[in-house]
Amino acid sequence: MEGLKFIDTPALILDKAVLLKNIQEMSALANKAGVKLRPHIKAHKCSKISNLQIANGASGITVAKVSEAEVMFSAGIKDILIAYQLINTEKINRVISLIKKGASISCLLDNLCQTKKLNNAAKENNLIIDTYVEVDSGLKRTGLEPEDVVGFVNELKSFDGLRFKGILTHAGQVYGALKVNVPAIGHQEGMIMEKVAKSLENAGFVDFEVSVGATPTVKYSAYNPKVTEIRPGNYVFNDAIQVGLGTAERDRCSLKVLTTVISKPAPDRIIIDAGSKTLALDKGAHGTEVVTGFGIVNGYPNLILERLSEEHGVIKVSSAGKVPAIGDKILIIPNHACPVANLAEELILIEHGKENESWVIDARGKNK
Amino acid sequence: MEGLKFIDTPALILDKAVLLKNIQEMSALANKAGVKLRPHIKAHKCSKISNLQIANGASGITVAKVSEAEVMFSAGIKDILIAYQLINTEKINRVISLIKKGASISCLLDNLCQTKKLNNAAKENNLIIDTYVEVDSGLKRTGLEPEDVVGFVNELKSFDGLRFKGILTHAGQVYGALKVNVPAIGHQEGMIMEKVAKSLENAGFVDFEVSVGATPTVKYSAYNPKVTEIRPGNYVFNDAIQVGLGTAERDRCSLKVLTTVISKPAPDRIIIDAGSKTLALDKGAHGTEVVTGFGIVNGYPNLILERLSEEHGVIKVSSAGKVPAIGDKILIIPNHACPVANLAEELILIEHGKENESWVIDARGKNK
């Protein structure tokens, strides 16, 4: 903490050594499983981190939004999967523009309306756009039911502006699960995709990607023999939810929020200068099952971050132990690191406990 | 909706006529109650709106962060209350710098640690800084207990770099209350401050501000004979929580999120392109008591915005009625407008249902 005392707060502190360890370990997992690693950048929205992932073996990146793809392409990354159903003409035009500039873009499909729009745009521009087809492996968000995939991929043949590149799923329901159920969800993610892949092979399709992954599930789904690609995102940071799910130990949480105690109005109450506009209100998909409060107060097991206003965090002193004074700085491990990075403008990197440099979160707020 | 069909999504749509009506009505309330209006800009973080508030009679503004004050001062606003306990040297130095540039800044106190720091900085720079003393009227966040205020204000006399300007409270606990209890909380906010004001008068203090207010409570607290100033914020927009608390009718919600249906994977499920990174996860302080889901799907009473991922909204079709198609655009009234504005880069203003201009949310993300 000594090295952080001159940093104004709230600030996002990123431990460079832990970040690098998290990145390298995921690359090692992908190598061991014999799959490509295409990390989702939504967690960090920072092109410096994307490039570090690429430098450490990632084959490309995944984004949710065209505006994220634009930022990452500007930073030199060419192989980008936009894992999101594109509908609006403006977004499709921006994808076309990126492809014309040399980006290798893949898009995601789960319905004919957007398939037609994307196909028309591709043909008007004499392009062929790579596409993944989304499969629902239990999240019940977007994606086709597994049994409907072969029919849909067969229909795709008639859209000659599009090329079928593979199938994709995201078992995001793991974030609503208990720790004990995580391995089963990961294995099931792989097995559902294996079944769909075999059906596609039986229908004559060859050489397609089978893309899976969320940070908690990849260590189980990546080893499925049919899986070819994983797309974890959060692992660069980890957070209290990952700790609660058993995905990472607390010492592998590379991102923390540095905050200052601004008031101590009662013996059992401390107020810090980080609220929901810094830490976000995420409590995990199922609320309090894997996390307590709105973040872990690092080094103070007796403190619970009980409430968040927009710019205030209200900490309850829940039992005996040391309690920070007004003006003291403390670190919070956020519940969910992804919205936290999206709320900030920069990451302050520390090495050996000292401020080293700052990285702009250049795709922060890019939601179009 | 016809006029919005070419706007890419998700986008924040601001109805200019409703915005103006909300601003003028609050100014009228302040006039009628004979109090100053010093709106909190945290709700909109947009200097164009701050200036509109000033042009319609606001005497100054309230901010939470020095960086918000800097943005607003750059936009021509001079009278700024930073309603937040400043501790960090960097923030205090920036306040001093603003004062030297001609800003009229007031600061907030509730403890001696920050009082000493602010006083030292003022004296080192040969300045006298105006200060409000915060009173806790039931929120149990920051602020002194009412009975401790006179003692604290007496102690302030020995800090000759600071001037006692008034007392301040925020009855934010109203956001955790039921609609039926809102008037009582507002009246109590006024009565607690009246009692403290009388104690201060008995101790010889005269001509100080008595500042109260949250959007739901001002219509009750502003009329207290001792209150001199109100600081509502959210009223410029209103939102689903205000509707739930009975503060505003739905037609007075000026801010909506325009979003596109991107997928319809099941008859009872629709996916839109706005998730927690656009709409935030706020459900009101007490969760589901005054709101249902994560926003009101405008014009579709049969649709409930049931789940938010980061970039996806999952809508449940809960009963018979019209259902939008893939590619259709729909409007969502957010649960809590303040974090929504903070997540976006611009407001798209509409007049007579058509896009008119866009306003940059220039203090977005300014949390230091």
Image (tube, coloured by chain):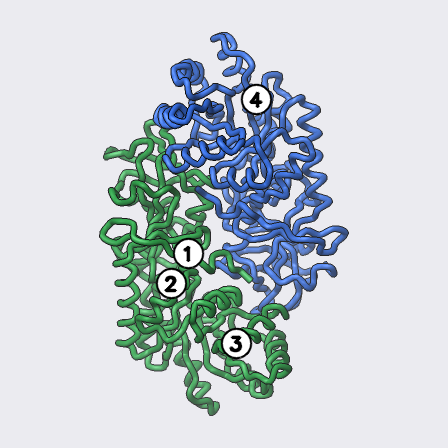
Chain colours: A green, B blue
Q: Are marks 3 and 1 on the same chain?
A: yes
For residue B190, which numbered disc appears in the image?
Answer: 4
Q: Name the secondary structure under disc 2.
A: helix
Q: Quadrant of residue B11?
A: bottom right
- Dot 1 lies on which element? strand
Disc 3 + disc 4, Cβ < 8 Å: no
CA separation, marks 1 and 2?
8 Å
Lower position in the chain sequence, tag 3 or tag 1: 3
Q: What x and y, as percent, mark residue A106?
A: 49, 76
> Left or right of A24: which side holds A272?
right
Q: Would you call the spot at circle 3 few (<14 residues within 10 Å), some (14-19), or many (20 or more)? A: few
In the picture shown, does residue A149 fall above or below A345? below
Dot 1 amino acid type: Val
Tell which circle, 3 or 2, labels the residue nearer the N-terminal end: 2
**Relative depth, front residue between B229 and A137:** B229
Give the residue at mark 2.
Answer: A48
Q: Chain of mark 1?
A: A
Q: As drawn, is A55 to the left or to the right of B31?
A: left
**Residue type, numbered disc 3:** Lys
Mark 4 crowd level (few <14, some 14–19, many ≥20, 10 Å Cα): many
Q: Is residue B333 left or right of residue A277?
A: right
In this rendering, the label closer to the viewer, 1 or 4: 1
Category of crowding for the residue at label 2, using alpha-carbon neighbours closer than 10 angstroms: few (below 14), some (14–19), many (at least 20): some
User: Alpha-carbon distance for marks 3 and 2?
Assistant: 21 Å
- The CA span between labels 2 and 4 is 52 Å
Mark pair 1, 4: CA separation: 45 Å
- Dots 1 and 2: beta carbons under 8 Å? yes
Instruction: Report the residue marked by disc 1.
Output: A360
Residue furthest out toward the bottom: A204
Name the residue that disc number 3 marks: A101
Left or right of A71 in this view: A90: right
Residue A315 in picture, x, y percent from top left: 36, 37
